Image (cartoon, rainbow, N blue to C red):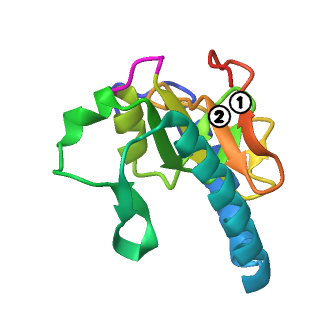
């Protein structure tokens, strides 16, 4: 296919293998382990959101907290001071591995470098290396149940 880097298939295969392994690890977690991890993630995330003062929040679909008020559209993300993204893995330089659809990479591409971007992970998903392709976007930090908020080495923000 035109436009693909020579190593694109190798990177893609490596990402698929890593994603498959980590998702299998998630599926093998007991309900109790998942519940405990979720409680830790929620506590760390709540502390971060409170520190960022994102305004008034209400309970949305599936129990998620979301801002109140009118929906602002896709370009409003540029005004955010904090963006939380899901991930399957993040490496120590902030490279994020998602589910493979590219939606969050497109969102992250709209942001400037002052927006704090944080991925939520289970323990064991903050890894040494994630294969990266040119379209992949990095995050500045990750939250895990055991480590809490952990900035990446390339991060430019401070607590």
In the shown orientation, is residue 44 left or right of residue 118?
Answer: right
Q: Are there few (<14), some (14-19), or many (20+) residues within 10 Å of tag 1?
A: many
Q: Position of residue 50 (x, y in %)?
A: 54, 44
Question: Would you say residue 113 is visible in this rendering?
Answer: yes
Residue closer to the observer: 58 or 1 = 58
Q: Main secondary structure of the magenta part?
A: loop
Residue beneath the point at 50% across and 55% down: 99
Task: Please name the residue shown 41% across and 75% down the image.
Answer: 62
Res. 151 mark: 1
Which region shows up in magenta?
A: 110-114
Q: Position of residue 144 (x, y in %)?
A: 73, 51
Residue 15: image location, x then y, percent = 62, 46
Which residue is pictured at 20% across the width and 52% down the height?
69
Query: Residue 40 sits in which quadrant?
Result: bottom right
Residues at marks 2 and 1 touching, judged by CB atoms closer than 8 Å:
yes
Question: In the rendered image, which residue does mark 2 sit on?
Answer: 141
Of all residues, the one furthest to the bottom in this rendering is 31
Give the image quarter of residue 112: top left
Name the spot of residue 110 as percent of width and height, x first.
33, 27
Q: Is residue 106 above or below residue 146?
A: above
145 on left or right of 53: right
Q: Residues within 10 Å of mark 2 (few under 14, many from 20)?
A: many
Work out whether mark 2 precedes mark 1 in sequence or the reverse, and give the earlier one.
Answer: 2
> For residue 4, which numbered disc appears in the image?
none
């Amino acid at each position: 296919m035109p436009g693909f880097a020579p190593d694109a298939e190798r990177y893609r295969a490596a990402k698929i293998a890593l994603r498959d392994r980590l998702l299998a690890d998630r599926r093998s977690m007991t309900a109790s382990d998942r519940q405990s991890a979720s409680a830790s993630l929620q506590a760390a995330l709540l502390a971060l959101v409170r520190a960022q003062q994102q305004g008034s929040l209400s309970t949305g679909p599936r129990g998620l907290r979301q801002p109140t008020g009118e929906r602002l559209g896709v370009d409003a993300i540029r005004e955010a001071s904090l963006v939380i993204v899901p991930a399957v893995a993040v490496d120590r330089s902030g490279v994020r591995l998602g589910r493979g659809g590219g939606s969050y990479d497109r969102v992250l591409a709209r942001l400037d470098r002052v927006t704090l971007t944080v991925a939520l992970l289970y323990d064991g998903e903050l890894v040494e290396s994630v294969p990266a392709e040119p379209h992949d976007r990095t995050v500045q930090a990750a939250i895990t149940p055991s480590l809490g908020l952990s900035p990446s080495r390339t991060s430019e923000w401070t607590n």
